[in-house]
Image (tube, grey):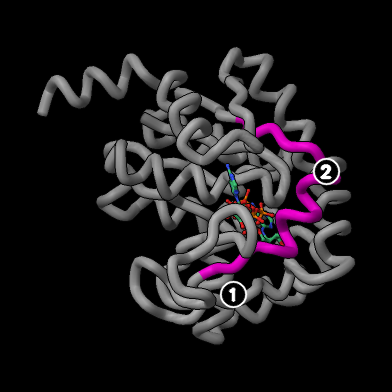
């Protein structure tokens, strides 16, 4: 099962993806997370990505596509994957088509996490992430049991640099200009299904599982 999660920054793609991983047993491939991992480890890729991420801009398509192509070679992606934050431009989507074709694979579902911009701005400023395992929280809507501490691994929760101030607005602008056109790109292929990004997390997961239900039931029956 190969899934793309589409949606604005802060719509809840990462939150949904981590829940789906637990149910579907396929990896969550998030280009933003891979860039942040490289940034933390001070690699050349991390340094390059930082110069774009800090301004809310997109990392160049060729860099991003090559990174995803490499990631697909890992054994865990053989049975499928959940792509989060990729593709983000029409050229990235076209390149993804080529990569998948060469691997004899295709996209099965594109799940659009719908959310209004004005609600998103509030959401992003309250987001906190675990600096160790990446688990996502919110200071109001998804609080950890202990303030500032990750429920899963006990590490410190931090605010992402690009969740601060004007960068959020720039990211939303970039989303509407460069990424939103992908909705039509995948609608033309009859792949798009929507979930309500502002429903409760359980409800969003339920809506997504309903969309991919047939495949999910088949897999559970096989086990
Ligand atoms: P990336 O990391 O991909 O960020 P994004 O797409 O902007 O998405 P976010 O991670 O901000 O939001 P999300 O939708 O995952 O929301 P979340 O689940 O956390 O990209 C960062 C940067 O990297 C880009 O700006 C770019 O520079 C670069 N980059 C990445 N990919 C690239 C590419 N392909 N090409 C070029 N450049 C690329 O939820 C948000 C908050 O809401 C959280 O606090 C969460 O707890 C809360 N929440 C979520 N769902 C719910 C719910 N249902 N109820 C209550 N609270 C909820």
Magenta stretch: includes residue 125: yes
As measured in the structure, the alpha-carbon distance from the residue carrying label 2 to the one carrying label 1 is: 30 Å
Q: Look at the picture and state if 116 lies above or below 156.
A: above
Question: Which residue in the structure is indicated by mark 1?
Answer: 45
Disc 1 residue: CB within 8 Å of ligand 1: no
Q: Look at the picture and state if 90 lies above or below 189.
A: below
Residue interval drawn in magenta: 112-129
Q: Is residue 168 left or right of residue 64?
A: right
Residue 186: mark in rendering: none
Can the viewer see residue 154 in this picture?
yes
**Residue farthest bottom in this picture:** 42
For residue 71, what is the image quadrant? Answer: bottom left
Q: Is residue 123 left or right of residue 103?
A: right
Magenta stretch: includes residue 111: no
Give me the residue at 46% from left, 36% from top.
202
Bin the neighbour count of mark 2 within 10 Å (Cα to Cα): few under 14, some 14-19, many 20 and up. some
Q: Position of residue 101 (x, y in %)?
A: 46, 30
Of pointers 2 and 1, the one earlier in the residue sequence = 1
Q: Look at the picture and state if 195 lies above or below 147.
A: above
């Amino acid at each position: 099962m190969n899934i793309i999660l589409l949606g604005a920054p802060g719509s809840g793609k990462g939150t949904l993806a981590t829940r789906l991983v637990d149910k579907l047993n396929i990896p969550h491939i998030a280009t933003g997370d891979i860039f942040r991992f490289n940034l933390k480890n001070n690699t050349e890729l991390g340094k390059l990505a930082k110069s774009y991420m800090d301004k809310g801009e997109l990392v160049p398509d060729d860099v991003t596509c090559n990174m995803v192509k490499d990631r697909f070679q890992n054994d865990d992606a053989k049975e499928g994957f959940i792509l989060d934050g990729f593709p983000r431009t029409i050229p990235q989507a076209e390149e993804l088509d080529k990569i998948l074709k060469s691997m004899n694979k295709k996209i099965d579902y594109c799940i659009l996490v719908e959310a209004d911009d004005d609600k998103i701005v509030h959401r992003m400023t309250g987001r906190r992430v675990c600096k160790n395992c990446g688990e996502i929280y919110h200071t109001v809507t998804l609080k950890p049991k202990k303030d500032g501490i990750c429920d899963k691994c006990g590490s410190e929760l931090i605010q992402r640099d690009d969740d601060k101030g004007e960068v959020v607005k720039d990211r939303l602008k970039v989303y509407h200009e460069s990424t939103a056109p992908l909705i039509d790109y995948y609608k033309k292929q009859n792949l798009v299904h929507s979930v309500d990004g502002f429903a409760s997390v359980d409800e969003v997961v339920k809506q997504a599982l309903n969309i991919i239900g047939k495949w999910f039931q088949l897999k559970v029956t096989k086990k």
